[in-house]
Amino acid sequence: MLHAETSLICQDGVASKCQSNLWTPSARSLARPSGPINKKPNLVGKPGETDKVNNLKQTDKLAVLKPKILPATIKPTKQERKTTTTTAAPTAAPTRFEHWEDSALFSSQPASDIDAMGKKRYVAPHVIYQTGKKPDEPCSITSSLNYFPEDEPGETNVTTTPKTPPSNLTVVTVEGCPSFIILDWEKTGNDTTEYEVISTTKGPDGEQVSILTTNQTHTTVENLKPESSYEFKVKPKNELGPGPTSEPVFFNTESADPRVSENVSGKDAIWTQFPFKTDSYSDCHGKQYVKRTWYRKFVGVQLCNSLRYKIYLSDLLNGKFYNIGDQTGFGEDHCQFVDSFLDGRTGRQLRADQLQARPGFFRAMRQEPVHYGLIGGHSHISYVSWYECGTPIPGKW
């Protein structure tokens, strides 16, 4: 993007600066026509309109038709560009067959420490994405990852372990979403089939190490703890073994948000990983967690990731966990069951008559007690397959 702006300035802005390397006396002589000058201008007018040039006096006609000498800073014509390009220095613009990596017009690094406004470029310890999320909207890992396109699988040539470490390891945070970060790095080469992401946490609970494995050049680190220091490293791997580890990057989390960390009834309950039976209608198939709430029921969640999950309710820990229906919406207020003060995002939002009829719990408004009965089908009570409530599970801020 930086060099695209430079190109625009070069074309539309200071033309003399852009063409200083291209304009030569020989080029100026080529610009002058060698044959007789056609002094009759090419005019375009409406039918029946009088030719204004023919109405001029002879003295005015000479002034108008007198050829002007082109200034040195005028934009070269296509013929001039072609001629001067063949006689220019080797540092001229690259041909169309040149790869962009070898081009002098494009680079992965800024050409100068000064930006287009004349100010020194700002260097930060990490990158913050401003996605336009409103304060009352829940955070979404899934939506944030849309900014990182999936890496297309390429040809692998594995004859030895990876030789080069991953480079340009960057911590990306999403504004207003403190419970996770996204790590991004440059691909090492065709000898790498997957990456091992090593996270070391130093906080009030001591030092902890966790390892994630991915075949992409980015990954999320979820359930970050407040007031903790993190160190991240990435190691390339293939079937023959691991390669050299990247240089570490560091990241410090802030204190907990007081709106979420204040003591409220139900928040002292701790999520416990526990497998439970469900009346399954879910897009999430990850780990299952359970906790007891002030509703005197057990809330069960099954994770897509720490910020997207399916919420169920049950009267018994060892009993069946049921879907939750909504009489007036699509379950946005069901985030209350995971102690979120936000109305969440939900999906897939289908009408009740588009859903299979099944038993479950339901209610119409936030704070109402739930009832047990038929949902979906002809009940006019819809239910959804996932929720995003802004509350990370099992961690919390």
Image: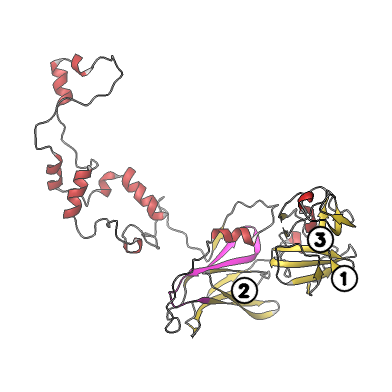
Q: Amino acid at mark 3?
A: Asn
Vertical arrangement, residue 191 with respect to residue 335, above or below: below
Few, some or many residues within 10 Å of mark 2 (<14, 14–19, 20+)? some
Q: Main secondary structure of the magenta part?
A: strand
Label 3 to label 1: alpha-carbon separation? 13 Å
| Residue at the (70%, 70%) spot, across then down | 286
- SS of the residue under disc 3: loop
Label number found at residue 205: none
Q: Which residue is mark 3?
A: 323
Few, some or many residues within 10 Å of mark 3 (<14, 14–19, 20+)? many
- SS of the residue under disc 2: strand
Q: Residue furthest left?
A: 35
Whether 159 is among the magenta residues is no
Between 255 and 50, the residue placed more toward the observer is 50
Q: Earlier in the sequence, mark 2 or mark 1?
A: 2
- SS of the residue under disc 1: loop
> Comparing marks 2 and 1, which lies closer to the viewer?
1
Label number found at residue 229: 2
Total count of labels: 3
Label number found at residue 319: 1
Taking the image as shown, residue 316 lies to the left or right of residue 138, namely: right
Taking the image as shown, residue 205 lies to the left or right of residue 32, namely: right
Give the magenta part as a residue range.
Answer: 170-194
> Comparing marks 2 and 3, which lies closer to the viewer?
3
Q: Amino acid at mark 2?
A: Ser
Is residue 13 visible to us here? no
Q: Amino acid at mark 1?
A: Gly
Taking the image as shown, residue 186 lies to the left or right of residue 287, namely: left
- The color scheme shown is secondary structure
